[in-house]
């Protein structure tokens, strides 16, 4: 398999780091969220020539606003709508924002049900 | 300009075996925008990992999809094996290749049948599925199951295939190659099929790259990307190179899948020839710690299993990024500007697996 790197970054660094990946010719592979007992983790993963890099952003809770990277990688909009609909993550400025209507799950924020619609944990 | 109308496509639709919904914004017969929504059958299987121990969860991972079930199970096992620092036996790696490629053949034949049905070519649909049945018979002979193989396990595989059985399988596959050529030839040469597919649903290589397309959708747009190139399982020893077409239309995606049928048979032949006798599993010890992204190539493209362990027998997180999910943005681009009558064919050429996407 190719190399695999997981790098911790701050929310404030996200846009600059993702822009740098774009200029290196990296492909956005996926964005995912993990709910841990005391925090949330976001992974932004990239690939170039099968080498895999993932930026890990830690959030204290889902009230922390995250800037959208869909202005840098358009395909990010699908993942950002997903983490909003399933985890209640507040993503600012999604290029194609379905406003909570992308996932038609019976229960809203199914992976983070404690989260209230306004973003208050 | 005429007024715009919104036409709902799905979640129940004759060409869709599973529910996905598109709001199609049309002007006359031209689609100007497609707005997707999913989640109608979302099962929340990822969260079951909090209640099933990491060994038992293989059963759940295999049930994420009824078409590429083995590859789901195998990729999950690869993620856990990495966390446990387990090196599986060589023979298990080759067996994983053989079952992965049998999955790819039956999946592509399933797709060919569904697509033929979508554009009204019923005899081609039946011929494709008749051939798929024979592949399912081979899978049943080697695993005991036709849909769920139950053969992947953390630490290797559950079953072996004897040398005699392998030779029998190879003989059958070689004989089926003539039928692949016959059915594939109809797809690639028939004027009515070409009429429905050529120049329809075009995705340029730039769009495919920017929009994160994967699998035959990406390779049909001229980009030679295939996770088998990373050499996981035993692919690194089989001299693999991806099938690529450049037109970027429905026909190109169809060409990729048809050419991959023969490629899969070649890979099975090479794996059978190189596979030495030996153990098929190693003992699993310890509990998973850390996090890892396992990536493999399913029939529809790259699948990613993210596993995060904290040293207990339950993983903290298991996330599946399925190829169908990654192909939604490219699909929305392909649909923009197409004719309403072409929507079913375009949707089918990404080979959507909603069961996977609704894991």
Image: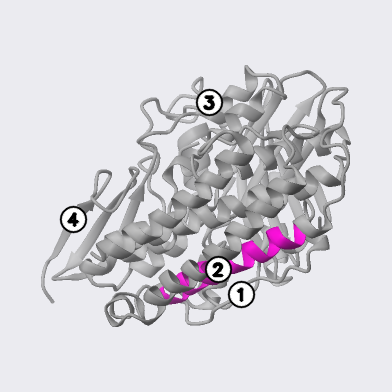
Q: Secondary structure at mark 3?
A: loop
Q: Subunit of mark 4?
A: B
Q: Earlier in the sequence, mark 1 or mark 2?
A: 2
Residue carrying label 1 = B223
Q: Secondary structure at mark 2?
A: helix
The image's mark for residue B218 is: 2
Question: Can residue B33 be seen from the camera position used here?
Answer: no
CA gap, disc 3 and disc 2: 33 Å
Q: Is residue B296 above or below residue B1?
A: above
**Crowding near pointer 1: few (<14 within 10 Å), some, many (20+)?**
many
Q: Residue at position x 78%, y 69% from top?
A: B239
Return the residue found at the far left.
Answer: B2
Q: Secondary structure at mark 1?
A: loop
Residues in magenta, as a range: B251-271
Residue carrying label 3 = A112
CA gap, disc 1 and disc 2: 6 Å
CA gap, disc 4 and disc 2: 28 Å
Residue carrying label 4 = B7
The mark closer to the camera, 1 or 3, is 1
x and y percent of residue B292 in the render? 77, 41
Q: Residue at position x 76%, y 18% from top?
A: B313
Is A86 situated left or right of B22 in this image? right
Question: Is B18 in the magenta?
Answer: no
Q: Subunit of mark 3?
A: A
- Mark 1 and mark 2 residues within 8 Å of each other at the beta carbon: yes
CA gap, disc 3 and disc 4: 33 Å
Residues flagged by tags 1 and 2 on a common chain = yes
């Amino acid at each position: 398999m190719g190399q695999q790197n997981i790098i911790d970054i701050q929310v404030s660094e996200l846009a600059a780091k993702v822009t740098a990946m774009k200029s290196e010719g990296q492909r956005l592979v996926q964005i995912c969220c993990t709910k841990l007992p005391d925090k949330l983790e976001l992974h932004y993963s990239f690939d170039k020539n099968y080498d895999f890099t993932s930026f890990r952003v830690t959030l204290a809770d889902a009230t922390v606003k995250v800037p959208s990277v869909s202005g840098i990688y358009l395909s990010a909009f699908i993942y950002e709508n997903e983490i909003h609909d399933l985890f209640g993550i507040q993503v600012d400025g999604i290029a194609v924002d379905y406003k909570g209507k992308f996932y038609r799950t019976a229960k809203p924020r199914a992976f983070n049900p404690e989260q209230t619609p306004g973003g208050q944990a | 300009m005429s007024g715009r109308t919104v036409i709902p496509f799905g979640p129940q639709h004759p060409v869709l075996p599973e529910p996905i919904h598109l709001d199609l914004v049309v002007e006359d017969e031209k689609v100007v925008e497609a707005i997707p929504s999913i989640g109608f059958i979302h099962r929340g299987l990822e969260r079951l990992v909090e209640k099933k121990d990491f060994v038992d969860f293989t059963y759940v991972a295999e049930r994420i999809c009824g078409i590429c079930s083995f590859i789901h199970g195998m990729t999950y096992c690869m993620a856990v094996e990495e966390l446990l620092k387990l090196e599986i036996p060589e023979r298990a790696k080759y067996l994983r290749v053989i079952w992965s490629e049998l999955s790819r053949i039956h999946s592509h034949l399933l797709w060919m049948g569904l697509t033929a049905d979508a554009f009204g070519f019923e005899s081609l649909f039946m011929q494709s599925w008749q051939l798929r049945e024979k592949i399912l018979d081979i899978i049943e002979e080697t695993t005991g199951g036709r849909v769920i193989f139950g053969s992947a396990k953390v630490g290797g595989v559950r079953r072996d295939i004897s040398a005699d059985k392998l030779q029998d399988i190879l003989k059958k596959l070689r004989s089926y190659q003539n039928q692949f050529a016959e059915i594939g030839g109809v797809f690639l040469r028939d004027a009515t099929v070409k009429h429905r597919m050529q120049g329809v649903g075009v995705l340029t290589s730039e769009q495919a790259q920017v929009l994160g397309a994967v699998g035959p959708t990406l390779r049909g747009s001229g980009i030679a990307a295939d996770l088998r190139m990373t050499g996981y399982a035993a692919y690194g020893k089989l001299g693999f190179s991806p099938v690529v077409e450049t037109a970027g239309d429905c026909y190109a995606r169809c060409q990729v899948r048809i050419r991959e049928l023969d490629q899969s048979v070649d890979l099975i032949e090479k794996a059978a020839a190189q596979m030495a006798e030996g153990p098929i599993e190693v003992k699993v010890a310890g509990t998973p710690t850390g996090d890892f992204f396992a990536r493999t190539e399913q029939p529809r493209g790259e699948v990613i299993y993210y596993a995060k362990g904290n040293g207990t027998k339950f993983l903290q997180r298991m996330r599946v990024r399925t190829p169908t999910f990654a192909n939604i943005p490219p699909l929305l681009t392909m649909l923009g500007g197409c004719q309403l009558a072409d929507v079913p064919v375009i949707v089918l050429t990404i080979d959507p697996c909603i069961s996977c996407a609704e894991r």
